[in-house]
Amino acid sequence: MNSAEPETRFVFVTGGVLSGIGKGVTTASLAKLFQFRGYTVRIIKIDPYLNIDPGTLNPIEHGEVFVTDKTWVFVPVPGFEFLISEIDQDFGTYERFTGIEVSPSQNITSGQIYISVILGERRGSFLGRTVQIIPHVTDAIKKRIWEIVDTPPCPDVVLVEIGGTVGDIEAMPFLEAVRQLVLEVGRSRVALVHVTLVPYMKSVGEFKTKPTQHSVRTLQGLGLQPDIIVCRADKELGDAARAKIALFCNVPESRVISNPDIPVTYELPLSFERQGLGKILVEHFQMEHRKPDTGLWERVVSTFQSCTGSIAIAMPGKYTSLSDSYKSINEALRHAGAACGVRVDVRWIDTDDDPDVASLLAPMEGIHGILLTPGFGARGVEGMINAATISLDHGIPFLGICYGAQLGTVAFARKMMGWKDAHTTEVNPHTSHPVVDLLEEQRRTQDKGGTMRLGGQEIRIVEGTRLHELYGEKCTRERFRHRYHLINDYVDKMREKGMVVSAYDSTGRMVNAVEVTDHPFWIGVQYHPEFRSRPGHPHPLYLGFVKAAIQHQKRGGGAS
């Protein structure tokens, strides 16, 4: 094997002990190590759940749904089609780290695999044969992986993150498919990276390696020997723990990599680089040694580390018990904050019990901006509307995202127009002022999965608006995920009180953004700009919002 050979290498990332320990960030950081050396990468995420995609999952259960720019038509068998643009939240991490837009086809779920096999059986694809997990399901998994690998231009390295933890029954077919693929392509083209938790027991002052040992043994029992073990811990792994893991898990000590808690997650690739992981991977694959160019990424990381001030942003919503419900929004705020030299402290406000305006004033004391969050359904809606009302009453910078923009407009209609029962028909179908209503094409569908207005859409920004000032262009592209939208006739009536449309769709008929003219900063957008924000390149809308919050702070403003 030498660098002149065009064969793609594979990095499979598995997890052990428990979920949520950072496999996604680890996978993205590994990809960055190859990018530092000028190699091309592509990332696949395998999710073992039976959903076709995560679009109908509760964010509190699974985190946010990441929306891609391009949509993908999944055809398990001819005659069946599923439109997919909603994928796992880890793809947001992949895009932010690598700067590469992903395809929805790169998210493989058990639901996609099993429906392909089962519908194939009904069509006669397996006539005379008993359909089984091995070889039929594992073959379907490998086929999907190869389809992604072979999509031009073929990457130098494909990284595959397998969701869940080793030992989960749902993940077994995928791990077996990996074992088979290793045999088929050869061990020199595959690196197995296992991410595991190494708890530190303060009572005895010692790292405990036994959970990692058990996790690796489970993996070995499935025919997979990890080449590299990435150890998540509260702090840097000690030499004794590293040596013990190496001994009992059958890996060289140099390949036991420490992954401690760090304040800036974007520093992780640099931490891996300092531990020699990039060199280890290149040597493992017998690839050409290239000097890593980390300069640009180091400068990006330094902007997060050098923040000297802080601002407080209130985020009222219904999924606040899990911060990953708004993962991309949190990161977009951090990107904008780093660009402005400030740390953004998010103040979560749970609106489940629909607090009134008076009840919200205390938790909003000292805040410098209000970001009204996306979501669906009636739960917590009145509390969100009341939060938007506070932004109007106190001149607090406001940014409404998707549902947040719709409810912010409802607040304006009630407060400024005097339409006391104004609402979205999603919550009140009988309102006499339906300022938000169902998209016309949505009236013709009963299915919930993959049927919203999804993916990248062209938007046309109205000149002379604050939105136009922020973007500096009249036409752009943003990602959407909604069934309901702002009704133009009602927004036109609200112009007399200062609300104007600042962006339309490509037809010029559908409202994509609104803003209030006599307010320091009040913008609501139907799309999700956070999906396009990157470290070192914050989205202009989030950057404008953070700058407005800083100015509000300087003026000594707040909610009380």
Image (tube, rainbow, N blue to C red):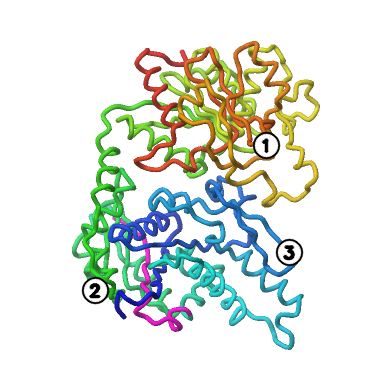
Of tags 3 and 1, which is closer to the observer? 3
Tell me where residue 467 appears, x and y as whole percent: 51, 26
Question: Which residue is under mark 1?
Answer: 377
Which image quadrant for residue 536? top left
408 left or right, relative to 533: right
| Crowd tier of the residue under label 3, counting other residues whose Cα lies within 10 Å: few below 14, some 14–19, many 20 or above | few
Whether residues under marks 1 and 2 lie with C-beta atoms below 8 angstroms apart, the answer is no
Q: Residue furthest bottom?
A: 128
- Residue 103 within the segment the image draws in magenta: no
- Residue at 76%, 76% (x, y): give it: 123
Which quadrant holds residue 194? bottom left
The mark lying in front, picked from 3 and 2, is: 3
432 vs 274: above or below: above
Pointer 2 residue: 252
Determine the image quadrant of residue 377.
top right
Residue 195 among magenta residues: yes
User: Which quadrant of the figure contains the N terminus?
Assistant: bottom left
Range shown magenta: 181-200
Amino acid beneath label 1:
Gly
Task: Determine the CA span between mark 1 and mark 2.
Answer: 52 Å
- The kind of residue tagged 3 is Phe
Choose the circle earlier in sequence order: 3 or 2: 3
Q: Where does the image place residue 519, in percent across and percent down from the top left?
A: 51, 14
Amino acid type at mark 2: Pro
At 29% from the left and 47% from the top, the residue drawn is 262
User: Which residue corresponds to the image point at 50% horizontal and 22% vertical from the top-left?
Assistant: 466
Q: Mark 3 points at which residue?
A: 80
